[in-house]
Image: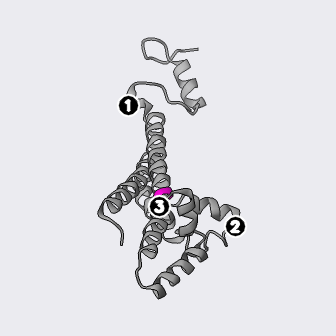
Amino acid sequence: SVSLPLLFCLFTAIMLCASGLAYIIAIVISSSLAVTVTGVLIVGLTGFFAGIVPTLLEADPITRVSLELSYGRWSLQCMSSADFMSIPNIFYRDSGMQLIDIFGWPMPDELEAMGEGPCDRPLIALFAMGIVYRIVGCACMVACHRNKQHKPPLCEKKNPMKDAEVAMKTPGGRPSMH
């Protein structure tokens, strides 16, 4: 079974990842599309890229990158590995070890040789991704909302019609006659 402190750390790390992604989407995507994009991304990153089908061993290089960035995969690996390794019944424990091997996760003896537990790497990966997502979200907020900071936009689109219209006006606001 998984301990309560471990569950707390795992859910905190998942919350960091999910909310960090949601911040990025809410800032970058228009509000009419943000809910749809968030739903698709959250479902995609947790459901489709959780490392079960395809497994880490079966994945092509592009899918492998998606699996490495999937917080669903890391949380599933942590929960399942910790649970499989603590099953007292030898039959179920062997089934759990077979699943760990099929999914391509580190085996208990490999983890023991490295001095790690089943959730050490997943928790580090989840916390790191959550922090990176929040930093990217902060950078997006600064870059996308410069007008609210009374600063010029970073990539201002030129409007030739507006530039010509401004050039035609005199300082008093009336169009010039030439």
Q: Is residue 110 magenta?
A: no
Q: Which mark is residue 88?
A: none
Nearest the eye: 22 or 121: 121
- Farthest bottom residue in view: 91
Residue contact between numbered discs 2 and 3, judged by CB atoms under 8 Å: no
The tag on residue 117 is: 3
Above-or-below relation of 125 to 175 = below
Real-space Cα distance between discs 1 and 3?
47 Å
Q: Amino acid at mark 2?
A: Asp
Label 2 or label 3, whichever comes before in sequence order: 2
Q: Which residue is mark 2?
A: 60
Q: Is residue 70 left or right of residue 20?
A: right
Q: Amino acid at mark 1?
A: Lys
Whether residue 49 is visible: no
Q: Residues within 10 Å of mark 3 (few under 14, many from 20)?
A: some
Q: Which residues are magenta?
A: 117-121
Residue 60 screen position, x and y as percent: 70, 67
- What residue is drawn where x is 58% and y is 24%? 164
Q: Dot 2 surroundings within 10 Å: few (below 14), some, or many (20 or more)?
A: few
Q: Which numbered disc, 1 or 3, marks the residue that appears first in the sequence?
A: 3
Q: Which colour assignment does the render follow? A: one colour
Q: Secondary structure at mark 2?
A: loop
Residue depicted at 44% across the width and 59% down the height: 38
Compare residues 61 and 126 and report the one nearer the observer. Answer: 126
- Give the position of the C terminus as an image quadrant: top right
At x 48%, y 48%, the residue is 128
> Can you identify the residue that label 1 sits on?
148
Q: Where does residue 71 sit, x and y in percent of width and height?
A: 48, 60
